[in-house]
Image (tube, rainbow, N blue to C red):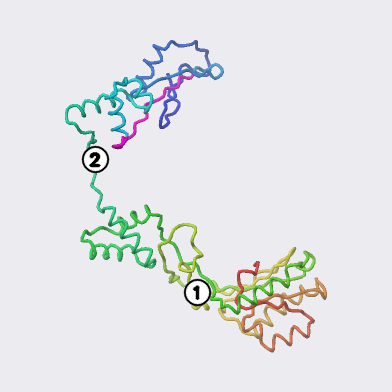
Amino acid sequence: MQILYVKYVSVHVCVGGAIRETGLISARKVRRISFASTPRRISWCYFAAIGKIQIVTVKMSNHQRLDDGMRWRIVGRLEAVQSHVQICREFNLTPSVVCNLWKQFLDTGSIKGKPGQGRPRATTATEDCYLSIVARCNRGATASQLSRDLYAATGPRVSRVTVSKRLHETGLFVRRHAVCVPITSTNRRVHLAWCREHRDWSMDQWATVLFTDESLFSLNTDSCRTFIWREPGIRYLPSNAREIDHYGGAGLMVWAGIMLDDRTPLHVSEIDTVTCVRYRDKILESYVRLFRGAVGPEFILMDDNARPHRALLVDEFLESKDIRRMDWPARYPDLNPI
């Protein structure tokens, strides 16, 4: 006999081996093998032959905790003189469960189950609801703060781990703020007008556009990020977003550009600020001018309207090199494919 594997509701036992043939086994031997394989009670079993290997599949009883409603339904059927076998088949229970329930009802007149083992729950349903409401009203509160608020409001003192578990049960998890750029109604109107102007562009027209952008990668160990409590799928709601218009701190400035079928190398600068002179000498002269020569007069440069990009010195350089610039609406980072 050889045990292959054990599942939640079944045990699979292989009798014999893959090398030699085995004959069919009687039901009596199956029961003897099954009881030797597991100490759990067996409801029923059946055969399944695969090739030359005889597989005996033993179905185990589905032990489940009965609620009060199901207990009263079973008692009602027993009072209606329904047989134990029919009740076991209907509710998928073993005869011992039905017998013990009926005996308990006749002796005590109650169907209450035994109290569960383990520590009692530290909070009540009302306190769990209070934690959920406070966390949704003050999404930036930490678990320790919520624990102190619960102690001040209701009395019981619970740990921050317990608070986190209760909030997880209600669907609240710790997540970072969604960072976005503040946009006014004027910005929205300009964005809509720009989209309507370029919605009919062909692939050939977009293939001549070089999309560029630069990003600052912070070298600080502390990112100063704050966390909030929120449900999955609502990251970009206004209540879960934080508007940031500028970023500070030392770091590396990385610039790059992409086109439909090409891209520029990454330009990494240890100087974390971009001036119009550096932008002209390091970026426009070294990368953009070469792409303009390769694409031709149809070449269009796209930048994000940063102050160094709109300096008079940069405008004069682009005009001297015959480089066209795309009219890009302000505060529109989400449209830039790079």
Position of the N terminus by quadrant? top left
Amino acid bearing label 2 = Gln
Please state the horizontal and vertical placement of residue 208, each as a whole percent of the image.
77, 70
**Horizontal and vertical percent position of residue 92:** 37, 27
Residue 338 % position (x, y): 64, 67
Coordinates of residue 222 in the picture (x, y in percent): 43, 71
Quarter of the figure with residue 57? top left
The total number of labels drawn is 2
Look at 82% across and 73% down and name the residue there.
Answer: 296
The numbered disc on residue 47 is: none
Stretch of the chain drawn in magenta: 55-69
Check the image and name the residue furthest to the left.
107
Seen from the viewer's position, the closer of residues 133 and 275 is 133
Q: Residue at x 48, y 19 (%)?
A: 55
Disc 2 secondary structure class: loop
Quadrant housing residue 271:
bottom right
Write down the residue under mark 1: 243
Q: Looking at the image, which residue is at 41% across and 60% down?
A: 174
From the viewer's perspective, tell me whether residue 30 is left or right of residue 144.
right
The residue singled out by tag 2 in the image is 117
Distance from label 2 to label 1 (Cα)?
A: 49 Å
Badge 2 crowding class, 10 Å Cα cut-off, few under 14, some 14 to 19, many 20 or more, is few
Q: Amino acid at mark 1?
A: Glu
